[in-house]
Image: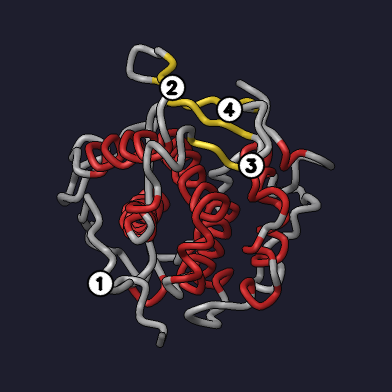
Amino acid sequence: MACSPLGSLGPHCNPPFQMGRPSPGCSCLGGALGLMGMQKSKAKPNGKKPAAEERKAYLEPEHTKARITDFQFKELVVLPHEIDLNEWLASNTTTFFHHINLQYSTISEFCTGETCQTMAVCNTQYYWYDERGKKVKCTAPQYVDFVMSSVQKLVTDEDVFPTKYGREFPSSFESLVRKICRHLFHVLAHIYWAHFKETLALELHGHLNTLYVHFILFAREFNLLDPKETAIMDDLTEVLCSGAGGVHSGGSGDGAGSGGPGAQNHVKER
């Protein structure tokens, strides 16, 4: 199957949300790569050892090499001199939201309440917290729906993501973007952990790898993800991003490092 632009993943795609934002520049992969999530979520070991842990197919060399472009993403994520930081974050965030939602839609028929009874990645189970801070135990598809619904609401709110001339971004905007990125990371990680087999069968792993690299390098560039949060996928990040102008998971002064040995097995509740 020939690789198509990420904005056109094929007949399996029917994303529940589609939206856009005027781009202040070429913010993403030739205009084709994309993001979001809001409420607080916490994670802790779920006590189960998923079968996928025995063999991580997404780490096999023949699969990690797959890309839809050889572009140097490190250059693509840097803030252009003439662009406002918040505008750059907003443009990329809405684009990532759209494409992560699109990528998930390609395997959504396989992600059901029966196959994915929890929102699990490795030995970690993520929980959703509603607006009142109440912990909600939900299946993976329910969790993703919470993420996409809440982010859709945010990115279409002119008071949060203004698109009209003269409107100001809220003072809490960067903090909000970090929360969004955390939830989007959970969705990407779940696709790799629980549905890479289906992604491979659809020959969309090149799209997934490209999206992951772009998203992680953008988040690192602006310190949008806590290394402890992403440590669960450090093995994949190391393989995919080390040759894409990214920072090795071993750590650096910009906070892009790993959570340490064994950190990928669980994320402490916080």
* Nearest to N terminus: mark 4 or mark 2: 4
Whether residue 196 sits left or right of residue 37 in the image: it is right
**Amino acid at circle 2:** Lys
Q: Quadrant of residue 216?
A: bottom right
Circles 1 and 4 in contact, beta carbons < 8 Å:
no
Rounded to the nearest angstrom, the CA distance separating label 1 from label 3 is 30 Å
Residue shown at 35% from the left, 61% from the top: 106
Taking the view exactly as shown, the residue that stands out farthest to the left is 164
Disc 1 packing (10 Å; few <14; some 14–19; many ≥20): few
Q: Position of residue 113 (x, y in %)?
A: 38, 36
Asked whether, in this view, residue 261 is left or right of residue 78, the answer is right
Q: Position of residue 140 (x, y in %)?
A: 42, 38
Residue identified by numbered label 1? 11
- Residue at screen point 49% across, 55% down: 195
- In 3D space, how far apart are the residues under numbered discs 3 and 4 (Cα atoms)? 16 Å
Q: Secondary structure at mark 1?
A: loop
Residue located farthest toward the front when viewing the structure as drawn: 114
Which is closer to the viewer, label 1 or label 4? 1
Residue assigned mark 4: 43
**Residue in front for this viewpoint, 50 or 76:** 50
Task: Judge whether residue 173 can be spotted in this image.
Answer: no
Q: Secondary structure at mark 2?
A: loop
Separation (CA) of disc 4 from disc 2 = 11 Å
Amino acid at the residue labelled 3: Pro
Closer to viewer: mark 4 or mark 2: 2
Residue type at the position of mark 1: Pro
Mark pair 3, 2: CA separation: 18 Å
Of residues 207 and 69, the one nearer the viewer is: 207
Question: Residue 137's mark?
Answer: 2
